[in-house]
């Protein structure tokens, strides 16, 4: 399907591997120019080399750095403007669910998980919005949230609360930016497997437990793939999703029950 993304520039935060990398690949396939980002320079360089093959390298730009840092964010958008001259869409795929279980959580842990899962996407948004608002043809923001932000789960409490805050923020931001032709949506993935990801690591030592979880909790009885999330993200950036804003799209094989 031609999504009409040719000549569009998409900044994909957190795109050196997993879901973010798949989003970058989907956007490149649709003719968009893509900014890849990641904290690990070697992993990012590998993604740049592989995704830029087949003559797509001129539409690809990579920036290494920690996007929790406001100075890194500001520099990243300045470099993007120098490279492509514009930014049309933001995919905010930053976060981590790594944490400890239980109700007793230290203040530092709450701050850490909120900083990367909520405040980093907010900082990205506030830095990019002046550029998005200047686009006469309209722009969009897509946040990669999680199903843990929608209902109860065994995930660490600070992580779940931060993702819930992100979903709420995206919906309210959509109300404010709608009249200015900037669409805002969130995607809440369920259990997504990719090599080197958290589920890949769990499978290496707890195969039976993981299989039992899929059997009992996920009606489709399987993991999702990064590509299944990426295809939705690319669509939400496109003019074909022109009337879609203020929503949170669940991609979880039917796992959630409350929505």
Image (cartoon, rainbow, N blue to C red):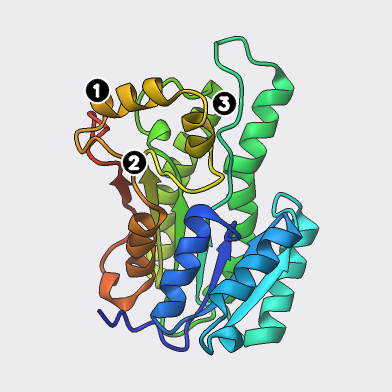
Residue at position x 55%, y 16% in the image: 101
Classify residue 220 by image quadrant: top left
The answer to whether residue 19 is above or below residue 133 is above
Residue closer to the observer: 54 or 83: 54
Mark in front: 3 vs 2 = 2
Q: Is residue 159 left or right of residue 251?
A: right
Q: Earlier in the sequence, mark 3 or mark 2?
A: 3
Q: As displayed, is residue 46 above or below residue 144?
A: below
Q: Quadrant of residue 146?
A: top left
Q: CA distance from mark 2 to mark 1?
A: 13 Å
Decide which of 161, 198 is in the foreground and name it: 198
Q: Quadrant of residue 182?
A: bottom left
Neighbor class of circle 1 (other Cα within 10 Å; few <14, some 14-19, many 20+) is few
Cβ atoms under marks 3 and 2 closer than 8 Å: no
Identify the mark nearer the N-term, 3 or 1. 3
Q: Residue 134's spot in the image, x, y percent?
A: 54, 80
What residue would you read off at disc 1?
216
Nearest to the observer: residue 174 or residue 142: 142
Q: Quadrant of the C terminus?
A: top left
CB under 8 Å between callouts 2 and 1? no
Q: Measured from the top left, where is residue 124 in percent x and y?
A: 62, 58
The x, y position of residue 32, in whole percent, is 46, 81
User: Are circles 3 and 1 on residues that touch, CB within 8 Å?
Assistant: no
Looking at the image, residue 78 lies above or below residue 166: below
Tell me how far mark 3 sits from mark 1, CA to CA: 25 Å
The residue at the point 38 percent across, 44 percent down is 189
Do we see residue 175 in this rendering? Answer: no
Determine which of the numbered discs, if any, sits on residue 158 in the image: 3
Residue 81: image x %, image y %? Answer: 67, 81
Could you say which disc has been placed on residue 223 in the image? 2
């Amino acid at each position: 399907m031609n999504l009409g993304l040719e000549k569009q520039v998409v900044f994909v935060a957190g795109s050196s591997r997993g879901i973010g990398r798949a989003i970058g690949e989907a956007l490149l396939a649709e003719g968009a120019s893509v900014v890849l980002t990641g904290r690990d320079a070697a992993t990012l360089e590998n993604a740049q080399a592989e995704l830029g093959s087949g003559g797509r390298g001129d539409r690809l730009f990579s920036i290494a750095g920690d996007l929790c840092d406001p100075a890194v964010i500001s520099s990243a958008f300045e470099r993007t403007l120098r490279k492509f001259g514009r930014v049309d869409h933001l995919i905010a795929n930053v976060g981590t669910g790594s944490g400890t279980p239980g109700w007793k959580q230290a203040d530092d842990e709450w701050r850490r998980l909120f900083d990367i899962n909520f405040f980093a996407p907010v900082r990205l948004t506030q830095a990019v919005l002046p550029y998005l608002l200047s686009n006469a043809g309209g722009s969009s923001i897509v946040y990669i949230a999680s199903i843990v932000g929608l209902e109860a789960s065994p995930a660490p409490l600070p992580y779940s609360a931060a993702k819930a805050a992100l979903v709420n923020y995206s919906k309210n931001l959509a109300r404010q930016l709608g009249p200015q032709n900037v669409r805002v949506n969130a995607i809440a993935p369920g259990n997504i497997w990719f090599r080197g990801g958290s589920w890949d690591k769990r499978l290496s030592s707890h195969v039976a437990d993981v299989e039992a979880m899929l059997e009992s909790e996920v009606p489709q009885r399987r993991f999702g793939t990064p590509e299944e999330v990426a295809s939705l993200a690319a669509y939400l950036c496109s003019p074909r999703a022109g009337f879609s804003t203020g929503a949170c799209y669940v991609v979880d094989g039917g796992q959630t029950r409350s929505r």
